Image: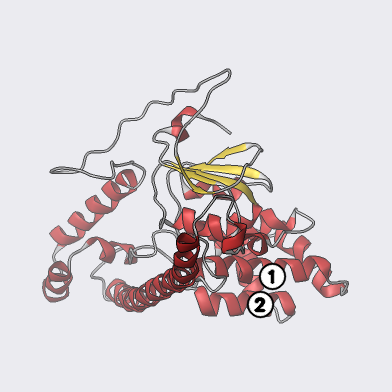
């Protein structure tokens, strides 16, 4: 099943890299300077510059943030800062892509019709597919649209909590604005009434634990209290073969880019095969640079599989532990 190009996850790619393509193909002196201006600045500085500059690139970047700024890695977590609050991850992507003369619009290769399916189908099967495929495309697009709407509402709550945390800091109730995100609703109300130092200490402990737990990996299904997976790096050599579940057809050859966490995503180079635990919306802008995608977990409707199909990228999921067995 291939999604229509209206799918929001893939639309993020088109928005981001249409900016880059226009920059690199435009002969205008001001626009031609943009890739260099992005490269020489740190992510925070480049983000501020793109958010204020009024050339074509700046306007496209600002339109993108206005439309998709509520999205990010771990976007459901109110503690996460989405692209509208921290666009450094988008700038990292642009820095990587700016080194490439042209970014291919791979989404065009993902369009296909029933008659092009490389399998023998009965007349009934072809009729069923002709009915099901358009509806499936609409359903996937609707799912992405509804998720984006949910995330947008969560972002409004996030903004409210940020305003509240800043006010609590100014009133001396919290030493750090981020601590509010490590308190329950009841504890926030209690802190507003009593200025309890015990609650502040509890939030500080939780924040410290969060930094560690956030790096752990957990099994997809847990019985009782979830326990992190203890993984030892087991590099392998020589000829070897992994077997997983194919989610998108095709063959890819290229350098393996093992990115166990999103913090390593900015190292991706054009033509590499991404090997990671799983992907979500935050990874989307990197897909046009990839030759293929391999994840440890996922299924036909997981983010990586859907976007890989949209961009015509070979995708294999369900190879548990591959990030600890391979290295870039």
At x 34%, y 63%, the residue is: 79
In the rendered image, which quarter contains the C terminus? Answer: top right
- Residue 9 drawn at (x, y percent): 50, 66
CB of mark 2 within 8 Å of CB of mark 1? Answer: yes
In the image, taking residue 160 as reference, residue 108 lies left or right, namely right
Residue 88 quadrant: bottom right
In this figure, which residue is indicated by the disc labeled 1? 18
At x 72%, y 66%, the residue is: 20
In the image, taking residue 266 as reference, residue 306 lies left or right, namely left
Residue 83 visible in the shown view: no
Does 167 sit above or below residue 328? below
Residue 319 quadrant: top left
At x 39%, y 59%, the residue is: 74
- Residue 212 drawn at (x, y percent): 32, 43
In the image, taking residue 269 as reference, residue 126 lies left or right, namely left
Does 155 sit above or below residue 296? below
Element carrying mark 1: helix
Residue 30 visible in the shown view: yes
Camera-nearest residue between 294 and 1: 1
- Residue 77 drawn at (x, y percent): 33, 63
- Residue 23 drawn at (x, y percent): 77, 69
For mark 1, does the 10 Å Cα neighbourhood hold few (<14), some (14 to 19), or many (20 or more) residues?
A: some
In this figure, which residue is indicated by the disc labeled 2? 60
For mark 2, does the 10 Å Cα neighbourhood hold few (<14), some (14 to 19), or many (20 or more) residues?
A: many
Colour basis:
secondary structure
């Amino acid at each position: 099943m291939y999604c229509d190009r209206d799918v929001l996850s893939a639309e993020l790619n088109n928005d981001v890299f249409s900016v880059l393509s226009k920059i690199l193909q435009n002969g205008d002196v001001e626009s031609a300077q943009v890739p260099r201006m992005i490269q020489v600045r740190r992510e925070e500085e480049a983000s501020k510059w793109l958010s204020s500059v009024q050339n074509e690139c700046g306007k496209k970047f600002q339109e993108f943030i206005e439309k998709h700024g509520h999205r990010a890695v771990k976007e459901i977590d109110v503690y996460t800062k989405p692209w509208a609050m921290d666009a450094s991850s988008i700038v990292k992507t642009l820095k990587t892509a700016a080194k490439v003369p042209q970014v291919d619009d791979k989404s065009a290769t993902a369009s296909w019709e029933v008659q092009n399916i490389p399998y023998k189908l009965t007349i009934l099967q072809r009729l069923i597919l002709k009915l099901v495929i358009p509806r499936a495309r609409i359903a996937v697009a609707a799912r992405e649209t509804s998720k984006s709407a949910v995330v947008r509402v969560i972002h409004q709550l996030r903004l409210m909590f940020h305003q509240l945390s800043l006010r609590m800091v100014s009133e001396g109730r919290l030493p750090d604005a981020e601590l509010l995100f490590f308190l329950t609703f009841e504890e926030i109300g209690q802190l507003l009434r009593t200025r309890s130092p015990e609650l502040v200490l509890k939030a500080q402990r939780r924040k410290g634990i969060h930094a560690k737990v956030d790096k752990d990996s957990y099994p997809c299904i847990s019985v009782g209290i979830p326990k992190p997976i203890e993984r030892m790096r087991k590099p392998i050599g020589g000829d070897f073969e992994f077997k997983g579940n194919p989610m998108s057809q095709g063959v890819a050859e290229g350098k393996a880019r093992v990115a166990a966490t999103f913090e390593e995503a900015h190292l991706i180079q054009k033509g590499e095969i991404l090997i990671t635990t799983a992907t979500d919306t935050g990874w989307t802008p990197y897909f046009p640079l990839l030759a293929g995608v391999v994840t440890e977990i996922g299924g036909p409707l997981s983010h990586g599989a859907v976007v890989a199909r949209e961009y015509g990228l070979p995708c294999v999921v369900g190879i548990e532990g591959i990030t600890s067995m391979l290295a870039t």
